[in-house]
Image (tube, rainbow, N blue to C red):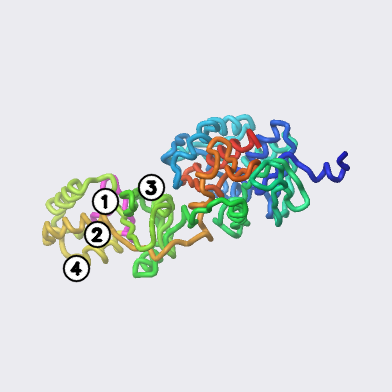
Amino acid sequence: MESSEQIGRHYDVIIIGGGASGLMCAITAGQRGRRVLVLEGSNKVGKKILMSGGGRCNFTNLDVLPKNFISNNPRFCISALKRYTQWDFIALVNKHGIEYGERDLGKLFCLDSAKDILNMLLAECDAAGVTIEVNRKATSIRALQAGGLSGGFAVDEFTCESLVIASGGLSIPTMGASGFGYEVARQFGHAVLPTRAGLVPFTFSDKFKDVSERLSGLAADADLSCQTAAGTANFSEAVLFTHRGLSGPAALQLSNYWQVGEAVVLNLFPTESADELLDWLLALKRTHPKSLLRTLLAEHPTVRLAKSLVLELQAELWEKHADTALAQIPDTALALIGRGLQAWQQKPSGTEGYRTAEVTLGGMDTTELSSKTMESNKQAGLYFVGEVVDVSGHLGGYNFQWAWASGHAAGEVA
């Protein structure tokens, strides 16, 4: 017969990591009547939830499709995302009376604070009888039965039947990120794919760094693209100039596809074809023959370029015609200027890395997990969910939706 101390240290499910996927897994398992313990290494659960979306938490997206996710195994995410959809999470948000709003491209944000989402998850955990311990970094994990069979696990002084790794990736180490989950995966014989920072700003070390410093804080709607092995990656959203380089939604999205050594290309007139832009420039030449290009470029009917940006473009694209009246600029020169405005090419020196990255690309090899349950196919009773797995979403609430869906999938069976 077990002693009261032994009973107190044994749980049906132990979840390592109190982030979005870990809390969702805990709620789902707890609602099944499982005795659940969440071990969080930092002093607070849900830190990334609280900081996301500028403190308002972009908790999901109205349009969730497999194409919004990056993985070496692209079909892996489909099962979990179909079985716990954005509508399921929205229903939970509505149940708790949280006010939210839609922004561009289907992004859903809290109208008040990201605390609303975390408090909702904690309330659900409490209702499901989940135990949460903070400042508890797991230091020792071992299977209680060898050979990959299900005999439970010992996690420090605790034991459990099912163990869920929801410890996240390497992004934002100041929030407690570490490679712990990858270490556990390797311990049980799993492959871990190479990792790198994703959804992260670009940095520059050439003359464009000076340009970006001078324009720091300025945002412009643009197409930002780069070449990849699979073709051209392209995103049409805001680009933000910073003192280090380029940020903003388009830059963060493109960082998931960019490789070191490749150039990025800004199209500052994304709503125009090359012929349409040239026709507009030639029309300006006829109607404003004595004007300077820089004074008219900011007057495009649909594209609004700040004067400071126009001056930087002038220095790079038409410096020798800076003080030349439009009538005196050859049509061939205007054509070159037009091409430059739609293909302003720069080569980043790198990115800001994990320090500011929103996600970690790569990670736990999904070919060694069940896409339905997130369970290891090498060690029964061991599950991996959230960012530690090689599934990363685009910007816009997709990474949270993957956290909810993968956590729920494991919680249904762990």
Q: Which residue is mark 1?
A: 299
- Residue 113 seen in the current view: no
Say which label, 4 or 1, has the lower sequence index. Answer: 1
Which numbered disc, 1 or 3, marks the residue closer to the eye? 3
Q: Observer-nearest residue: 379 or 110?
A: 379
Q: Which residue is mark 2?
A: 294
Which numbered disc, 4 or 2, marks the residue closer to the eye? 4
Give me the C-alpha separation between circle 4 and circle 2. Answer: 13 Å
Give me the C-alpha separation between circle 4 and circle 1. Answer: 22 Å
Looking at the image, residue 215 sits to the left or right of residue 155; the answer is left
Q: Which residue is mark 3?
A: 237
> What amino acid is at disc 4?
Lys
Span shown in magenta? 296-309
Say which label, 2 or 3, has the lower sequence index. Answer: 3
Q: Observer-nearest residue: 392 or 376?
A: 376
Q: Which residue is mark 4?
A: 320
